[in-house]
Every structure is written in C-alpha cells, then in structure tokens.
Amino acid sequence: FPNNLTGTIPTEFGHIQGMTDFLLEHQTGLRGSIPSTIGNMGDLTSFSVLFAGPEFGGMVPSSMFTNPTIKWLSFMYNEGTWSFPPSIESKGNSSLLGIVCKSSGFSGTLPSFLLEFTSIKQLDMDDNSLEGTVPDS
C-alpha cells in the first residue's frame, strides 16, 4: 500500500549499509531519477520500482549493474520513462540473476553490456519501447 512519498530519493541513501532490499511500490508522488549512489550500497541484493508515477524515471545508474551484491533488478508497471546506460565502466556484475523491466516505459536500445552477465537466469523486457536488434552473444 502506498505511503504517499513525495519528492526525490536523497543521494545519501547510497551510503546506507546493511540494507539488502530496496523496494519502492505504489509511490506515485516520487519525481526525478534513481541517484547513482544507490548502486554503492554494499549489502543490497535486490532493487525494485513498481507502479511508480509519471514524474519518476530516467537512466538506470550504471552502478546498479556493477555492484557485486545486487542479484535482482525490477522495474514493473511504471508510468515514467526509463532507459539503460549506453555502457558501464567496469566489468558487469557476475552475481546478477535477473533483470525484469515489464511495462515501464523503457526506450532506446538494449545495451550490449547485458551480455557480460553470464549468471542471468531471467531477462524480461516485455511491453516497453525498446528498438534495434538483440546484441550478438
């Protein structure tokens, strides 16, 4: 059930230690984007944004794809516009098991760095506006 959070996610959240799951569900008052510091959370294993409003979106920080503790990334049924970073600066996370981006306004191309995640068991990009070809394996 919504807590009616409003505003932006503070960059200081990225300095929280001990948090394993970060879930934003039905928070239609959020605006802005995910701070890049979120990917620095040393114990984070899953990050989910579900049913967010139209003012919350942007590029998923590349740090979300390089943090070695993150196993699941989920963006489902969001009204905002989202995109992937065009590249990541270091080798991809070898622990990442799933990326689910269902009905969340993702646009642009599917980045080739996703092929670096050899541990992925689930990749779901259903009902978005992605274009181009699937990168060669």
Image: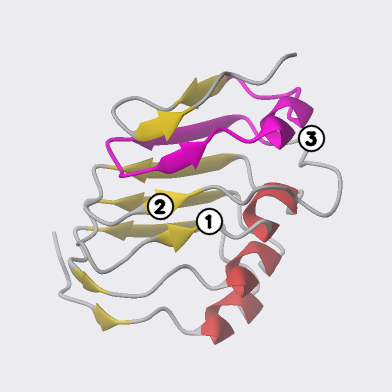
Which label belongs to residue 3?
A: none
Please provide percent x and percent y for residue 133: 56, 19
Which label belongs to residue 94?
A: 3
Work out whether mark 2 precedes mark 1 in sequence or the reverse, and give the earlier one: 1
Q: Quadrant of residue 75?
A: top left
Please provide percent x and percent y for residue 97: 62, 30
- Whether residue 111 is in magenta: the answer is yes
- Mark 2 residue type: Trp
Work out whether mark 1 precedes mark 3 in sequence or the reverse, and give the earlier one: 1
Using the image, determine if residue 70 lies above or below residue 32.
Answer: above
Using the image, determine if residue 40 lies above or below residue 60.
Answer: below
Secondary structure type for disc 1: loop
Secondary structure type for disc 3: loop
Label 3: few (<14), some or many (≥20) within 10 Å?
some
- In the picture, measured across the screen, residue 113 lies left or right of residue 74, that is right
- In the picture, measured across the screen, residue 3 lies left or right of residue 49, that is left
Please provide percent x and percent y for residue 55: 25, 69
Q: Residue at x 24, y 42 (%)?
A: 77
Work out whether mark 2 precedes mark 3 in sequence or the reverse, and give the earlier one: 2
Is label 1 or label 3 in front?
A: 1
Label 1: few (<14), some or many (≥20) within 10 Å?
some
Which residues are drawn in magenta?
Answer: 96-121
Which label belongs to residue 60?
A: 1
Q: Residue at x 55, y 47 (%)?
A: 84
Q: Is 8 in front, or is 13?
A: 8
Instruction: Determine whether label 2 and label 1 are within 8 Å by CB.
Output: yes
Residue under label 2, please give it.
Answer: 82
